[in-house]
Image (tube, grey):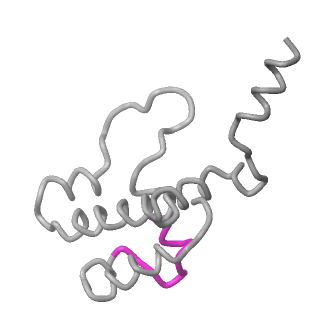
Amino acid sequence: MINIKKNRRALSPQIYPSDHNKQNILKKLYNRPNILALIRNKQLKGFGHTWRADGLLIKKVLVEKINKTRPLGRPRIQWINVISRDLREIGQNVTFELTYNRDRWRDLLKSVMVLNGPVG
């Protein structure tokens, strides 16, 4: 029994303290940017398309309130609230109207990829 434990310890891959963070492992394996920054970038990119869709149903669903009784408990997290929180983290002068200026919005999306750390 003791030999099995020794062999298991000797043959198992060594985990270094820096490898306990799964982000570092993924970054090394796939040579990709921070996965949280990538998800944030994709969400903001999709939001830009949605917010510029004036007069279409997709923007109407995003903007308008539903007149229905709210269920009990904590309100669900809404996508637009997550987006507004992300924009507040990026900069204080960033608003939804920035999506209409595509060049500045594209620059903002590039800056999101530079940000490190989790959202919220």
Residue 42 position by quadrant = bottom left
Q: Main secondary structure of the magenta part?
A: helix
Q: Residue at x 40, y 66 (%)?
A: 41
**Magenta range:** 84-96
Where, quadrant-wise, is the C terminus in this rendering? bottom right
Answer left or right for 48 relative to 84.
left
Relative to 17, does residue 77 appear above or below in the rendering?
above
Horizontally, is 4 left or right of 52 in the view? right
| Above or below 27: residue 12 | above
**Between residues 90 and 40, which one lies in front from this camera angle?**
40
Residue 113 rendering spot, x and y as whole percentages: 46, 73
Question: Up-down: is 50 above or below 12?
Answer: below
Seen at 36% across and 66% down, the residue is 44
- Asked whether residue 87 is drawn in magenta, I would say yes
Left or right: 36, with 110 as reference point: right
Q: Does 12 appear above or below 100? A: above
Point 23% across, 62% down: residue: 50
Quadrant of res 38: bottom left
What residue is shown at x 84% (from left), y 26% (from top)?
6
Residue 43 point in image, percent of width and height: 37, 60
Q: Position of residue 62 (x, y in %)?
A: 28, 54
Residue in the foreground of this view, choosing between 74 and 83:
83
Left or right of 1, for residue 67: left
* Quadrant of the image containing the N terminus: top right
Q: Residue furthest top?
A: 1
Which of these two is toward me, 79 or 24?
24
